[in-house]
Amino acid sequence: MTTALTHEARHALREFVPDPGALSPACDEHEFAALMEEMVADEAPRLFAVVQEYGERVDAVIAAWGMAFDDHAEIVTHQRRMSVRAPENALRMFAVGRHIRARLVWFNPDAATSTDGDHET
């Protein structure tokens, strides 16, 4: 017995999933792949970082990464994971005293520097 079959045989809800064997495919493989790609693009969470800023633009460090969904955000640090209703709700957890404040920075792929360290002009 293969691992996939073993896993399927042990799944508690297996009898509630109808066998799709008698159903015809909705479309060809290429169109189905395109539909899945559109679904993923439409529902993808927005990526952001929680940045701790030291002083008034003196220095900064990325303290956490997050993904914003329609109804909540998931945030990951090196030591923990948390879920909040909105990305902004996490900021108070990363502010430290009067000298370190936290801000959200939304990921912008166009802002990335080139791999050789030079900026494009």
Image: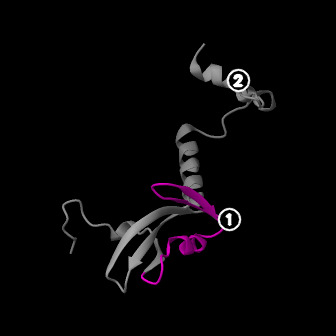
Occupied quadrant, residue 21: top right
Mark before the other along the chain sequence, 2 or 1: 2
Residue at 43% over, 72% down: 51
Q: CA distance from mark 2 to mark 1?
A: 32 Å
Q: Crowding at label 2, few (<14), some or many (≥20) Cα neighbours within 10 Å?
A: few
Q: Nearer the viewer, residue 38 or 11?
A: 11
Q: Measuring from the top left, give residue 100's x and y in whole percent.
A: 43, 78
Comparing 74 with 77, the one in front is 77
For image coordinates 59% across by 59% down, the residue present is 82
Query: Is residue 86 inside the magenta stretch?
Result: yes
User: Image check: 79 left or right of 118?
Assistant: right
- In the drawing, what numbered circle is on residue 71? 1
The secondary structure type at the circle numbered 1 is loop
Where residue 13 appears, x then y in whole percent? 77, 31
Task: Tell me whether circle 2 and circle 1 mark residues in contact (CB < 8 Å).
Answer: no
Q: Quadrant of residue 14?
A: top right
Q: Which residue is mark 2?
A: 10
Q: Nearer the viewer, residue 60 or 49?
A: 60
Question: Label 1 amino acid?
Answer: Asp
Mark 1, Cα crowd under 10 Å, few <14 / some 14-19 / many 20+, is few
What residue is rendered at 72% in x and 30% in y? 20
Expressed as whole percent of the image width and height from the top left, the position of residue 95 reads 49, 76
The three-letter code of the residue at mark 2 reads: Arg
Q: Which residues are magenta?
A: 71-99
Query: Quarter of the image containing the C terminus?
Result: bottom left
Q: Vertical placement of 116 versus 3: above or below?
A: below
Where is residue 6? Give x, y as percent. Answer: 64, 19
For mark 2, give the secondary structure: helix
